[in-house]
Image (cartoon, rainbow, N blue to C red):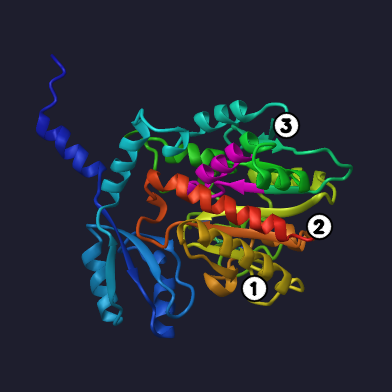
Amino acid sequence: MHWVIPLTILIFQQALLVQSEKVIRLTPQVEAHLTFLRGLDKRDDIEIDFWRSPSYLFQAVDIEVSEKDLPTLSSILKDHGIDFEVQINDVQKLIEEELETVGARSGGWHSRYHNLEEIHSKLIEFSGRMAFVLSLGKSHEGRQMRAIKIKGRYRYNKPVFFIQCGIHAREWVSPATCMYMIDQLTQKYGRDQSVTALLDKMDFVILPVLNVDGYAYTWINPRDRGYRLWRKNRRYHRSYRCHGVDLNRNWGYGWGGTGASHRPCDTTFRGSTPFSEIETINVRNYLKGLEGKLKGFIDFHAYSQMWFIPWGYTSRRTTDHWEQMRVAKAASDALRRVHGTRFKYGSSASLLYPASGGSEDWTYGELGVTYSFSVELRDTGHHGFLLPADQIIPTGEETFEGLKALVREMRV
Ligand code: ARG
Ligand code: ZN
């Protein structure tokens, strides 16, 4: 007996594995549309994934759906009088194009995306006289959560700015942007006046991949049971036979409110309790350990091009609303001047959707860090989570300018 597997079976298996997926965009016009859309991920006749959840009237909703389920979805949408357009025709093709750029040999480090090991070894390369690598602890699956601390001139009680990326695994441009900024900060201190000023004002601690397990999982080929579009961490819920807690619904301020799910298999599952997850616990402990020196905080996400101030869990304004708006405007103005990229600024509850248990609500609400933000990087949905690698550098450049303007405006 030899290993002769008929070619047709191989091709058939491939076809089964690689379901063609699309992303459609629609815009709710009346309240009934919203109610209906919110129930869409709870049906069992179709399987969908919100790339952008339903929030308010006239706010675009992006839905990933398989070719197989599209006819059903399109007819139920029609029944409800909802028009849609196809935003991404072939998700798989974009993933494959991305894979090709990953393997490319030409171009600099920031011209393509990198897996966790590459990111962590690059951090070591960036370390030196003014920068050192530390670990905030281990993840659920035992990976180190590596960060880098970058310092300028020493000062007693110097304020610290903490930046985290990659809390959501599939938002690849977020870790890439953190790495770009780390590169700038470590290589340009003492050479570039704006970078020097930045680091003499505050020390920076940057965690490029918070959700290390989830990120590693998005790098595993589907043939080996990985998934590029995974969002949550990788905790296993045995009795539900599914994985993951949404780490940006797990922080302990306003936890358990709207915009977070209590159902373990949902993409926005909040966890069993506030800070039920080791990844959020590790960051919480590190930030608490800074003992009041923490003066700035940003959590980078993708996509939508928005600079969020607190609150995320409620549409009520904070007591620091105008100060937060002032610096967010400075950041988004500076950002736009680089490549013309337009960012909206305001609270996420008012611009996108209310979502409780977010990181910036906790740093602001619990630690009193006035300058707490979360940011949605490029794009506005054309590529969504699958932003082509040739946009990493432009995204890094504009975001870094935004950050510099923000820090310049901060009163600390
Ligand atoms: N897209 C981000 C998320 O869904 C936005 C978070 C904004 N912050 C918040 N606390 N809602 O997690
Ligand atoms: Zn996100």
Name the outermost residue toward the right: 156
Which region is colored magenta? 163-185
> Where does residue 45 sit, x and y in percent of width and height?
30, 64
Q: Which residue is mark 3?
A: 130
First in sequence: mark 2 or mark 3? 3
- Among the 4 quarters of the image, the one containing residue 134: top right
* Viewer-closest of 106 and 2: 106
Q: Which residue is mark 2?
A: 412
Give the answer, above or below, for where 24 lies relative to 111: below
* Mark whose residue sits in front, 2 or 1: 2
Question: SS class of the residue under badge 2?
Answer: loop
Q: Which residue is mark 1?
A: 314
First in sequence: mark 1 or mark 3? 3
Query: Image quadrant for the N terminus?
Result: top left
Viewer can see residue 124: yes
Residue at 73%, 54% (x, y): give it.
296
Disc 3 packing (10 Å; few <14; some 14–19; many ≥20): some
Disc 1 packing (10 Å; few <14; some 14–19; many ≥20): many
